[in-house]
Amino acid sequence: MAAEPLNEPLNEPLIELRDVNKHYGKLHVLKDVNLTVGRGEVVVVIGPSGSGKSTLCRTINRLEPVESGTITLDGQPLPEEGRDLARLRAEVGMVFQSFNLFAHRTVLANVSLAQVKVRKRGKEEADRRSRELLERVGLLAHAEKYPAQLSGGQQQRVAIARALAMDPKALLFDEPTSALDPEMINEVLEVMRQLAREGRTMVVVTHEMGFARYAANRVVFMADGRIVEDRTPEEFFTAPESERAKDFLSKILKH
Amino acid sequence: MNVLTDNFALYGKGFLGTVELTVYASLLALVLGFLMASFRVAPVGSLRVFGTVWVTVLRNTPLTLLFFAVLLGLPRFGIVLPFQLFAVLALGCYTSAFICEALRSGINTVPTGQGEAARSLGMTFGQTLGAVVLPQAFRSVIPPVGSTLIALAKNSAIAGSFSVTELLGTYKTLNELGYSIVWSFIWIAVGYLIITLSISALFNVLEKRWGVAR
């Protein structure tokens, strides 16, 4: 895989986490996490299972509330549950491991629903925008199908189109390719690489080291609820500093 | 045998009374049950508590006791309504607790990811519930809601003891007129069957109609 040209991110923070802590019962899943994601930056979060990387991703739009610390989006602190939170969530697109397309709606309706309900676009305008986005991810021909009639890779591309339809400031990807058959992973990664090249702000939790290495501006390595390393992909993959990262990389890169 | 033909008007009045009670109480139960189910899954703690208390109290009170409470209790607070309306209130509130729980079990069959996806798109709690979760929960709750409404139709017989005109109550008059108690009850049973089988049929149609797109 050839190195891809990256847009130089601006040095302006869009997502900021300060001293974030979270427990599941007795389990301390996020320990004093600090992370800044600049506008236009692609940050890939990697780490072993149970290291808290998915939880970290889900705290950014408060699908997981945190116990202490602050999270700000574009300078605004995340509000408590309610309409203000909903408004802020619309600015952050999210793509899930299990796609989570609305099972009772067609592909087109999946992409249009929140545009109508949240962005208050007219139905025709929303459908027009949806068709543009479906065309972009190569699925316009499937617009009238139901999610269950599509393959995993196709469903995930629809989910990306659905997130883009809100014109979000940032996109969160929570292990977007982990539930996919191997031959479908690349079609999803290709869409994500395009988005990265466009200069979108992205936080990507993934096990795809190729994507981390060639599409990310920064790699964040997590273990046991802490951010252990936060560096450029080049530095991280060629000269990891911590033992934990060396160990992790030796296990996944040697085969 | 001629008990039906001789007393068609009486049976008809009783039958209509039961139908009215069933329809009005069902509507009230569905609306309240829907509201309480929304409360019980709401992100606001006080609403969840209210829904839980509502269900616990009404589901665990004998219906006859509830009738006494409504018919004798409410007038003490200056609320005087026709007995039929009191009966609708008692039946509707009682049944709403069961409808609420049927709806909630349906909501629980919808994968959490569906709601998360809706919320992540900026949809409010109401929009998430209304446009994403309930339409998918709806199909799986059709059979239990049907059963609950059939139970309501039969429970409406209790209203007869509180001088509300309904089907079962007709036996008293018929008995006084000296008709065979067996045949009186057989025709009453047929009347209930017409109502309950109609509810069954309606819910079978609903189940067929909405059993698509999954």
Image: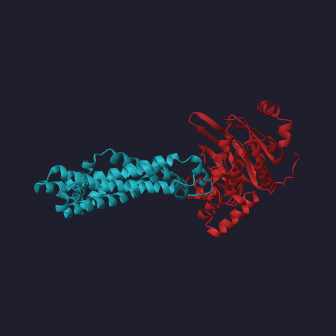
Chain colours: A red, B cyan
| Quadrant location of the N terminus of chain A in the rendered image | top right
Residue at 68% across, 47% down:
A17
Q: Nearer the viewer, residue A7 or A195?
A: A195
Which residue is depicted at the point 25% across and 55% down?
B70
Question: Could you say which is closer to the camera, residue A156 or residue A199?
Answer: A156
Q: Identify the image quadrant of residue B79.
A: bottom left
Q: Is residue B166 above or below residue A242?
A: below
For this view, does A151 lie left or right of residue B195?
right
- Residue B135 visible in this rendered orientation of the protein: yes
Toward the viewer: B120 or B199?
A: B199
State the image coordinates of residue A102 (x, y, percent, origin top left). Answer: 60, 54
Query: Where residue B101 appears, x then y in whole percent?
Result: 42, 47
Question: From this viewpoint, which residue is outermost toward the front?
Answer: B1
Give coordinates of residue B18: x percent, y percent. Answer: 27, 58
Place of residue B131 in the rendered image (x, y in percent of width and height, measured from the top left) = 54, 58
Nearest the viewer among A232 and B57 is B57
Q: Residue furthest right?
A: A2
Tag count in the figure?
0
Location of residue B109 with respect to A253 vertically, above or below: below
Quadrant where the C terminus of chain A sits is top right
Q: Is residue B46 visible?
A: no
